[in-house]
Image (cartoon, rainbow, N blue to C red):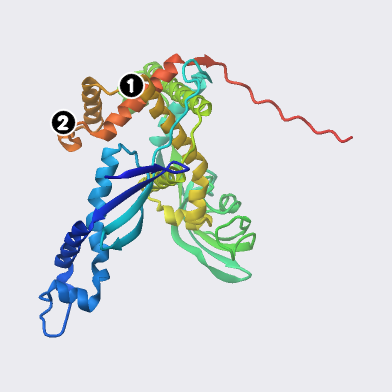
Amino acid sequence: MAVIEKLEHSKVAIKLEASREEFNKALMSAYNKNKKRFQVPGFRKGKVPYQLVVKYYGEGVLYEDAIDEIVNPAYSAAVKENELQVVSRPELDVETIDENGMKYTLTVTVKPEVKLGQYEGVEAPYMEREITDESVNNEIEAMRKRNSTLENVEDRAAQMGDTVVIDFEGFKDGVAFEGGKGENYSLKLGSNSFIPGFENQVAGHSIDEEFTVEVTFPEDYHSEDLKGAAATFNCKIHNIKEEKIPELDDEFVKDVSEFDTLDELKADIKKNQEESAKNEAKTAFMNAVVSVVADNAEVEIPDAMVENEVEAMADEQAQRMSQQGIALDMYLQYTGQSMEAFKEGLKPMAQMRVKGNLVIEAVAKELNIEASDEDYDNELAEMAKAYNMDVERIKEAMGEKNPYILETIVSRKTVEYLADKAVKTEPKDEEPAEEKTEE
């Protein structure tokens, strides 16, 4: 029978005991698990009797596995029986192992108690982005650029906006430096992908022309040897390509959309932008409401929960970057940032997330908000639609009443409830900083 003792900072001590009979049984199990690795003169490997193993190696050689044999099921049962919401790995302290058995304590961090403040009728700013002719035209221009082509240019020098194929080699104090050489490198002039000033100096030169570019590396450049250093690049242009943007007419519209006229395309873009603006405003308002409700609540956030959230956020960032073909560790190396410093920078946002989630959970419990069978089925149907899968396959993959999905539904319903009860206010303009006057 577990004895539960509440400690400070949302920690709980689970005090447990095992009889000597139970411990001896665990020792025998540990022996059977490991007997193939024991060797005693006169016995084949794996055939050494239990008593001789204890005599030659000492009983302690079996303790680690025996303790696991006892602790793991007892811990799981205690957590379930006492409905503990554990958010950290247990810390084991074996107090005694003697003729009476084994006494031990498991210390864990659990979800903290939340003291809710006002959560209904809170005020939060609401602002919907205005959709203008300019925003519609910008989208159309983006469509034109996405459908642009590159055509070879031979009768003029390179201009900003052109894409050039060049050779280059960099020198510092007359000595070539590592990473400063490239051959047949494709560079769009004006993309600002090279050192400041480099691309502007390439413009104005022609195919097969050899020339020199002089630059100064930024003070925050990732290479210590080149920070703030003056450098010279010997360059040669092999090819110049000019971006050709299609004419904006009905033929272009037919090529890139389901519409026949420019007016129809503009109307559709405006409709989509308005819908997007409403969704953005709704999401921002919901986040603001949760922030206010969280500020009104009192809760001591355990370090373990923040650390878990930091790890989750770091994984999310790594996944997003990998989709763009960038490894997180390489990005950190390039920016001169350690993983520890990167994770430390995530802590403030992690704390906000954890507190918000705890408060949402507390409100849901207070209002008895639950996920109905219909809610669950609708969620699976949306997932099937998003992943273009049969809903039955989704159900099979997720299992019966997946707890993560249930939690997601309850959280969303709770936030929607809070937002529905909240009061929309005008966003506050930032007050200009007061000028200091010398006395």
The residue carrying pointer 1 sits among few (fewer than 14), some (14 to 19) or many (20 or more) residues within 10 Å by Cα, namely some
The residue pinned by badge 1 equals 369
Q: Which quadrant, please, contains the N terminus?
A: top left
Q: In which quarter of the view is residue 40 placed?
A: bottom left
Q: Is residue 400 left or right of residue 314?
A: left
- Mark 2: which amino acid? Asp
The reply to whether residue 246 is in sight is no
Q: Residue at x 47, y 28 (%)?
A: 115
User: Which mark's residue is nearer the viewer, 2 or 1?
Assistant: 1
Q: Residue 209: x percent and y percent? A: 53, 59
Q: Residue at x 61, y 71 (%)?
A: 174
- Mark 1: which amino acid? Ile
The reply to whether residue 348 is in sight is yes
Q: Residue 158: x percent and y percent? A: 53, 49
Q: Residue 244: x percent and y percent? A: 43, 38
The residue carrying pointer 2 sits among few (fewer than 14), some (14 to 19) or many (20 or more) residues within 10 Å by Cα, namely few
Q: Is residue 403 above or below residue 58?
A: above
Q: Which quadrant, please, contains the C terminus?
A: top right
Disc number placed over residue 390 in the picture, else none = 2
Q: Nearer the viewer, residue 205 or 144?
A: 144
Q: Is residue 244 left or right of residue 65?
A: right
Q: Is residue 412 above or below residue 349?
A: above
Q: Secondary structure at mark 1?
A: loop
